[in-house]
Image (cartoon, rainbow, N blue to C red):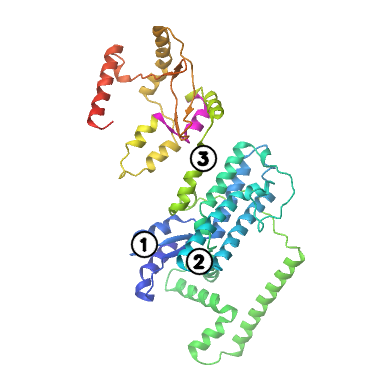
Amino acid sequence: MEADILVEGLQRSTEMHGVQYRTFIGDGDSSVYYQLQTKVEYGRFIKKNVCANHVVKCYTSRLYSIAKESKGTRSLLSAPKIKRIKNGARKAVSHYAKILRDCYGNTEDLKKEKSRLIQELASDLRNGPLHVFGSHDGCKSYFCNGSKADNVYQAVPKIQQVKLMSAANMIADKADRLITDDTSNLAEAIMSLVAKFSGGKQINRCQKGSYEHRCRGAGLHFQLGPEWHVKASKAVTCTSPAATLKKYTQRRFEMKRQTMSRKRRLFEESGHRERRYSNHAASNSAPHYGPSCQKPDMSAAVLSANTERQLQDLQVDDSKRASIEEETRGQASSPEWHKQRRLLLTASNFYAVCTRKDSTPCDTLVKRLLQPKGFTTAATEHRKQHESVALQLYATEKETVVQPCGLFIDLKHGFLAATPDGLVGTDRIVEVKCPLKYKEHEPLEAARNFSEKKTKRWRSGSL
């Protein structure tokens, strides 16, 4: 229903108001943004800004999930620390949004200043977890007073550090849409009034305009406050309402004022203590929310910065490469081998990436590389059974020693890697091929057929 309301409103915006709404504030609903782009005439120009409250809430839920998964070290990422990370993220967004609102100048200068503020905000959002764990090297004066607390970040297990920074990077990537500090508070407020007037979802209000009338009543209450009855009656009848109605609305107004005053007093007396939150992230099973939610594309600047950072993270030196190679010598039977190669472009996948047409969507290929699924076929089983035999026969035939090896990462281009089946000396590698279709052939015949097939593809330009 939410998507239908927005689509209908934007479809008729030019006809009714003579304007086009090119920016809307959304939360995690993927269907709304998709339908606006496909069903509204000017949908391709519509930009989605995110609700800062929803983004920080999702960030907090992700942190609670990390804490829950961290058995034995849960006390390091406790609820108070998560609350501090959350508050720090919200403070950073508000700080840079205020600076942006106070900016003046020509259009070009404003664009440059906004770009700078986005980069600063992204940097501070990534620094949030480090600040809470006592590492203040990247803290700015508005964010931190230079606390002398012990730096306990290194005590956090490596896998938990990676998850923490991954969560921080996810919110930092939205810096270009958080910089304006937009929220959907007004929409949430009016919908809460609609739910109050219509009895929520407990009563069927879909007949004879019942729901529409209550929505209008909620709108009047939202705009005019508790005295909306008097003002609406006076506008319709052009006469002063009865004294009974005036007394009723006055009493309602006074009750609301007293309630607000009491809440404010209790808040001040409590020393600004915030209520405790459960150490469990709320589950969200709605189909249009969560990881599968369709998100707007990154801006070119954010994509470029993320690419550079990822390439730097993948770069290794001689000692790191040797360590990874040693840890991954089990290859397919090694969990570390699967973990490392998922982040890299390996020789076995190089052809699929390089020969992909620009017109072919890359989502399926990316998913296959990042989230490979285990599978077993007759061909793979044949290879597993005969690979070691082939290596032994090769070593015997050549009177040499074939050393086992793991994953080798390129020193110049850290995103490239390969896993040979064995090493001979210091300058040769062995790669075993056991094609099932040639199992009944003699070795030389199979090699000749295999070589001819590759040569034809090379000559035709398809290889």
Residue 331 in the image: above or below residue 87? above
Q: Describe the element under mark 2 as helix, strand or loop.
A: loop
CA distance separating discs 2 and 3: 58 Å
Residue drawn where x is 51% and y is 40% of the image: 312
Q: How many marks?
A: 3
Q: Residues within 10 Å of mark 2 (few under 14, many from 20)?
A: few
Q: Is residue 343 magenta?
A: yes
Provide the residue designation for mark 1. 43
Q: Amino acid at mark 2?
A: Ile
Residue segment shown in magenta = 332-347
Which mark sits nearer the N-terminus, 1 or 2?
1
x then y, percent, for residue 362: 37, 43
Find the distance from the CA under tag 1 to the CA under tag 3: 37 Å
Quick one: label 1, few (<14), some, or many (20+) residues within 10 Å?
Answer: many
Of the pair 60 and 277, the residue shown nearer to us = 60
Which residue is disc 2 drawn over?
Answer: 203
Residue at horizontal 40 percent and vertical 11 percent from the top: 394
Query: Which residue is labeled 3 in the image?
Result: 312
Element assignment for label 1: helix
Position of residue 196 measured from the top left corner of the image (x, y, whole percent)? 55, 69
Q: Which mark is first along the chain, 3 or 2?
A: 2
